[in-house]
Amino acid sequence: MDPELFPRDRAEIAPGAVHLPGWLDAGEQRSLLEACREWARPPAGLRTVRTPGGGTMSARQVCLGWHWYPYGYARTVVDGDGAPVKPFPDRLRVLGRRAVTDAYGAAAPGADYDIALVNFYDSDARMGMHRDSDERADAPVVSLSLGDTCVFRFGNTATRTRPYTDVELRSGDLFVFGGPSRLAYHGVLRVHGGTAPAELGLSGRLNITLRISGR
């Protein structure tokens, strides 16, 4: 990767919401990408998520540890092939702890991360403003980006509208939100196709979101 002309620094986007650019190095990104390709294989592989109203999400998803569906969790892919959800990997548990420590300077209290939602975005995919509110724990959400750059909108806890901040998330970036921002609305406005690091060999964007279920 070309070095940054103006290095991107750590930024607190809102109280408890922290952006750490370039948190994953090139080797870690390649390793995670290969893992995501394995996780995406059936059974319990990458699927199109259908909403209760009959629509579909444009980002496709695979779950680890617990299977998320609108709006709950299960141990099987209840809205797909019915297979048992793939186990939550120890490597992601370690990454989750490290991410929170690096973002906040202290480890998160309570249980370890036990849910991963892996979303794949092609250049036309979006994610509407929503809250991650189906968990029974209030531990910080950890978000890792691989591949194409996206425009990520981080809002407030009361409404899908203003105030919000748009953040450019590039491959290797970390975004953590907890505390007063844990239930903030957020979404992906657009994906800039063709912006992934060439050496990664990925067309599109992968987002790995780690959560603690409290279950």
Image (cartoon, rainbow, N blue to C red):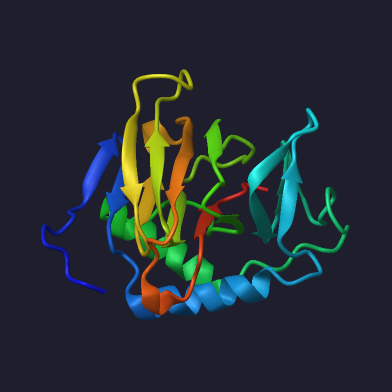
Q: Is residue 123 visible?
A: yes
* Total residue callouts: 0
Residue sitting at the far right: 82
Residue at image position (32%, 42%) is 167
Q: Is residue 178 visible?
A: no
Most foreground residue, 55 or 208: 55
Most foreground residue, 118 or 4: 4
Q: Position of residue 204 (x, y in %)?
A: 51, 60
Compared to residue 144, the image places residue 54 above or below, namely: above
Residue at image position (64%, 66%) is 88
Residue sitting at the far left: 6
Residue at image position (25%, 55%) is 105
Q: The N terminus lies in which quarter of the figure?
A: bottom left
Q: Is residue 206 left or right of residue 82?
A: left
Residue at image position (66%, 71%) is 39
Compared to residue 171, the image places residue 73 above or below, namely: above
Q: Is residue 25 left or right of residue 132?
A: left
Q: Position of residue 192 (x, y in %)?
A: 41, 52
Q: Is residue 126 left or right of residue 102?
A: right
Most foreground residue, 154 or 141: 154
Q: Quadrant of residue 52?
A: top right
Q: Position of residue 96 (x, y in %)?
A: 45, 61
Q: Position of residue 35 (x, y in %)?
A: 57, 76
